[in-house]
Each structure stands twice: as C-alpha cells, then as structure tokens.
Image (tube, rainbow, N blue to C red):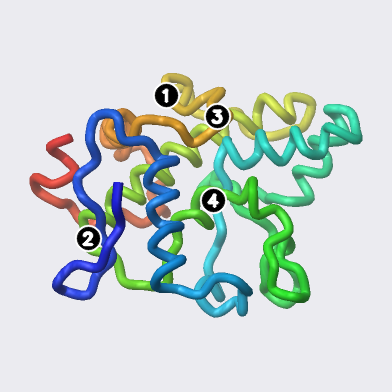
Amino acid sequence: MEVYINDGGELTCAMPLPQSTVAELAEAVGRFCLKAVDCSVCTHTCCAGFIVYGDNVFIRSLAAMIGQTMGKVDAGAVVLKAIALDFKTMNWFVRQTNGGTCQFLSPAGRCLIYNIRPLVCRMHVCRPSEPRYKLMKDYLYFAYQAALQYEMSRLLSAANLPQPHHWIKDNPLINMETYDAAIPEIIAWSQAHWHLRPESSPQPPHQPGGLHSI
C-alpha cells in the first residue's frame, strides 16, 4: 500500500486489496512521513490538544512489557495508570501529563514506547485527509477501540469496570497481538456495528460507494 497526497492536497491511499493489512497501511504512513514530515523529534504541535485513543494491540504489548518485571495483577494496575476510561463514550484513552502532553513523551521529544505505540500514533499525519481515507481510518479506530474494551475487561477482570457490549465479542480483532489484520474484514465489521456507537460519539459523513463497496 502507498499513502500519498492527491490533486486536492489531501492525504489518501489506494483502495485496500482483500489481503491488505493494517500493519501495511501503518508502514505506508511511516514511509510517507519519512519523506514529507520530520518526526525525528516531537515538538507536540501535530497532535496538540488531541485525545490519543488506545487499542487492544497496544495494551497487550504494554502489559506484556510491564509483565516482564511484575505479575499480571501489578501489570494491570500500571496499565490503568497509562490509560483511562471515558465513561460517557466507553472509550479508553492515553492519559496526559498536567501540561497536556503525552505521558510517554520524553523531555527531549522522543517517544518512550515507540515500538509499541498505539495505532492512532502510527496513522496520524499532520495533513488534511481525503474523506474516503478518513472514513477508513474511523472504521479501523472504531473496531480497535471496541476490541480494547473487551481486552480491558479480560485484563482487569477483578476491577469494577463496565462489561463490554455483547456485540463486541464477534470482533475479528479480539486476541490479536499484532496489526496484521485484513483491512476489508475490519471495515465490514465496523460497518455492521457502526450504528451501535454511543450517541455522543461523532458520526463520520456517509460516503456513497467508496469504502461501503468493500
């Protein structure tokens, strides 16, 4: 896959093939950034004020990294210090410092968890996105966030947390440990469950054809 700027100056990509994976898309975004955006040192300008939502692959990787030196219960406690739950939308997001920056950003502007960073961090580019491409990302984020809700209920089974909705259990991303999931399969799941999002969550514009034809 390749990510590029279209004639309208918007970031986009070609229509995913049946076997195209999220990992391939994230790698394509990384290649684009190497050429077009200097991300060698983060100055916290591209994502300033944004909420960084987590995903199940990120949390599994974070818990595994923490678990190398502590037990499962302690790892779960540390994970809860890293992310927090928005009880209004039931979405999990990465906690920020009092200054509003990511808690995983070093004073020198380096990501301290770069190799296991969340999907949204891998996909974000400080450029306007073509509507079809943005909708595709919204579908991916929705499915990964739903899988995270399931993952957190498993990881923190002893905690007094709301149980995930029953419709999340058929999410193809559940138990995934990498981003090697087929994009069309994720989009199909998100399209089927999109109407079940909390009413307070923003709805993307409807795009006739395009992604709905996948």
Query: Which residue position is annotated with label 2?
Result: 131
Disc with the residue nearer the chain's start (1 vs 3): 3
Disc 3 residue crowd, few under 14, some 14–19, many 20+, Cα 10 Å: some
Relative to 86, residue 72 above or below: above
Q: Nearer the viewer, mark 3 or mark 4?
A: 3
Label 2 to label 4: alpha-carbon separation: 26 Å
Disc with the residue nearer the chain's start (3 vs 2): 2
Give the residue at x 49% y 36%: 179
Quick check: can you spot residue 185?
A: yes
Give the residue at x 67% y 71%: 101
Q: Nearer the viewer, mark 3 or mark 2?
A: 2
- Is there a contact, CB below 8 Å, between mark 1 and mark 2? no
Q: Within the image, what quadrant is residue 126 found in?
A: bottom left
Under circle 3, the secondary element is: loop
Disc with the residue nearer the chain's start (1 vs 2): 2
Disc with the residue nearer the chain's start (2 vs 4): 4
**Type of amino acid at the residue the image marks with label 1:** Pro
Query: Which residue position is annotated with label 1?
Result: 172
Give the residue at x 57% y 49%: 118
Query: Which residue position is annotated with label 4?
Result: 88
Q: Is residue 202 left or right of residue 16?
A: right
Disc with the residue nearer the chain's start (3 vs 4): 4
The circle on residue 155 is none
Q: Nearer the viewer, residue 194 or 172?
A: 172
**Type of amino acid at the residue the image marks with label 2:** Pro
**Type of amino acid at the residue the image marks with label 4:** Lys
Give the residue at x 61% y 30%: 151
Label 3 to label 2: alpha-carbon separation: 30 Å
Under circle 1, the secondary element is: loop
The circle on residue 164 is 3
Under circle 4, the secondary element is: loop
